[in-house]
Image (spheres, rainbow, N blue to C red):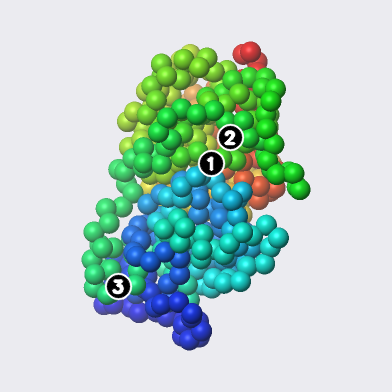
Amino acid sequence: MTDTLSAPSALAEAPFPRAKLVLADGTVFEGYGFGAAGEAVGEVCFNTAMTGYQEILSDPSYAGQIVCFTFPHIGIVGANHEDIEYGTPHVRGLIVRADAANPSNYRALMSLDAWLKKHNIPAIAGIDTRALTSRIRENGMPHGVVGRGETAALAEAACAFPGLVGLDLAKEVTSRQMYKWDETPWEWNKGYGKQENPTFRAVVLDYGVKRNILRMLAGLGADITVLPAQSSLEDVLRYEPHGVVLSNGPGDPAATGEYAIPVIKGLIDKGLPVFGICLGHQMLGLALGGKTKKMPQGHHGANHPVKDLETGKVEIVSMNHGFTVDADTLPASVKQTHVSLFDGSNCGIRLEGAPVFSVQYHPEASPGPMDSHYLFVRFAEAAKARV
């Protein structure tokens, strides 16, 4: 039976056209549309971050997904040209309780609504995001559609969405050719810097890499070469790297692993330092003999506590993933280094006797704010040891 939920007070004040979020199980949330016209179909997840919405929406790891923010007011600081993680956003759509039509921040160049229109991302506001979040927590991430059309047609589209299991989305978001990177992290009132005196060479395999990962590496002295996801082992070795980073990205790690895992195994056999992040972590786990599995709700937010089992330190981290490494399937030679304090799921591994390690979360983000930056230092030191 169709369940229709709406927020009348928000709708009464809405300056935009009516819109709906329709889930594959028939649930309908009524609100008003903003951003791009049209429809967005995908897997619906919720993100608990209170800030950083522009970085989240431009993270390629959200390809195939519609993001619901649990924080009620989104768009407060507008949008700019600096706080983006990829040139072209791949998120399918956006869901908020209330959008801020009049942003207030000295860095704002446009409203969130204008930014969404620019990147052709449909959005809906005015719905009960608490009810939606509760539904996802209880039943898992549903398939859904954000749109302004007829309910029946939207429901049909939601039911037709195949889901993310078995999908290799990295090949859709990756760069199409090799490129160099020398931009360093942002500084207050200075902006981004430039790495002019690199001390080691790093290759980054781009499964949907966030720009701040590259900036962190450049800030530690890396001469960075970014290669497309489907690059071969020979492609990587041609640049004579002192270390290799396996980036974040969207989709099913087992699907991307069809071509990525042989390359990762080859890098390990060559004795190169390897650092995996998010999707890169999952594929490293597969390459080392473990397995991955789909999570019911996933982890999406900037307030996740993760424990380093080797130091006892608890880090506050940023996460965005719907698949996880199954720690019970890891061979004896692979040690679990980090776990989520929310649900005990795996958040880090390392290969004994080798400079090969990875984490499920995003150490380049700053919710801690610098709790996890040591991981980049660890990789840089391992790479410099080979110079």
Q: Residue at x 42, y 37 (%)?
A: 174
Closest to the observer, 210 or 167: 210
Residue kind at label 1, given as amino acid type: Lys
C-alpha gap between disc 1 and disc 3: 34 Å
Closest to the observer, 36 or 292: 36
Q: Determine which residue is flagged by label 3.
A: 149
Q: Are marks 2 and 1 in contact (CB under 8 Å)?
A: yes
Answer with the quarter of the image where residue 200 lies: top right
Numbered disc 2: secondary structure: helix
Closest to the observer, 244 or 346: 244
Q: Determine which residue is flagged by label 1.
A: 210
Q: Position of residue 165 (x, y in %)?
A: 32, 46
| Label 1 vs label 3, nearer the camera | 3
Closest to the observer, 339 or 297: 297
Ranked by sequence position, the earlier of labels 1 and 3 is: 3
Q: Residue at x 38, y 63 (%)?
A: 139
Classed neighbour count for the residue bearing mark 1: other residues with Cα under 10 Å, few (<14), some (14–19), many (≥20) = many
Residue 214's tag is 2
Ranked by sequence position, the earlier of labels 2 and 3 is: 3
Q: Position of residue 17 (x, y in %)?
A: 41, 77
Numbered disc 1: secondary structure: loop
Q: How many marks?
A: 3
Q: Are marks 2 and 3 in contact (CB under 8 Å)?
A: no
